[in-house]
Amino acid sequence: MDQQFNDGLQMRKQVMGDDFVERAFANADTFTQPLQEFITRNAWGTVWCRDGLDLKTRSLLTLSMLTALGRAHEIKGHVRGAINNGATIKEIQEVLLHAAVYCGAPLAVDAFRAAQEALQAMATPKD
């Protein structure tokens, strides 16, 4: 792979955790593998690697945008990423509450539900 992919893979693992990224690639098949490579190279290897915003801020911005888009599944992963990047539960709560005003209550309800599920999963010991 190229340097941009390698940088993206390192950043993706740093933010989302090694297990999450390794599972994403292990679960990819010939149909979805190109998407995993594209995301790693073009999202994680570019924007996430830029100077200008710290990783915590990027994570909180990502949560707000995913809330606006109604992407509950992605919110779960990025809650974990935000925590890994130093965000507090209170900061995540405030971002989602702020989004309720600008994105609407139904989207915020789904975002809060997804975030709560992610936080509960993080608190549950793994076997």
Image: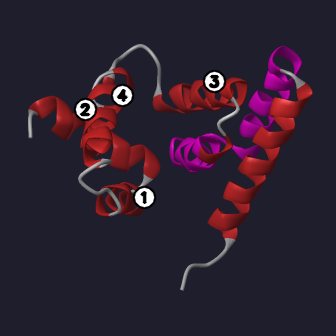
Q: Amino acid at mark 2?
A: Arg
Please tell me whether mark 2 sits on a helix, a strand or a loop.
helix
Q: Is residue 26 left or right of residue 60?
A: left
Q: Is residue 19 left or right of residue 40?
A: right
Residue 98, position as x, y percentages in the image: 82, 23
Which mark identifies residue 65? 3
Q: CA distance from mark 1 to mark 2?
A: 16 Å
Quadrant of the rendered image containing residue 79: top right
The residue shown at (33%, 19%) is 50
Q: CA distance from mark 3 to mark 4?
A: 14 Å
The residue shown at (80%, 49%) is 113
Looking at the image, tell me whether mark 3 or mark 1 is earlier in sequence order: 1
Residue 109, position as x, y percentages in the image: 86, 39
16 shown above or below 5: below
Q: CA distance from mark 4 to mark 2?
A: 6 Å
Q: Which residue is mark 2?
A: 41
Instruction: Name the quarter where the C terminus is drawn.
Output: bottom right
Residue 52, position as x, y percentages in the image: 42, 13
Q: Amino acid at mark 3?
A: Met
Front-most of residues 75 and 98 = 75
The answer to if 109 sits in the magenta stretch is no
Q: Which residue is mark 4?
A: 43
Seen as rendered, the residue at the extreme bottom is 127
Q: How is the image coloured?
A: secondary structure
Quadrant of the rendered image containing residue 27: bottom left
Q: Amino acid at mark 4?
A: Ala
Q: Do callouts 1 and 4 mark residues in contact (Cβ within 8 Å)?
A: no
- The range drawn in magenta is 74-103
The answer to if 100 sits in the magenta stretch is yes
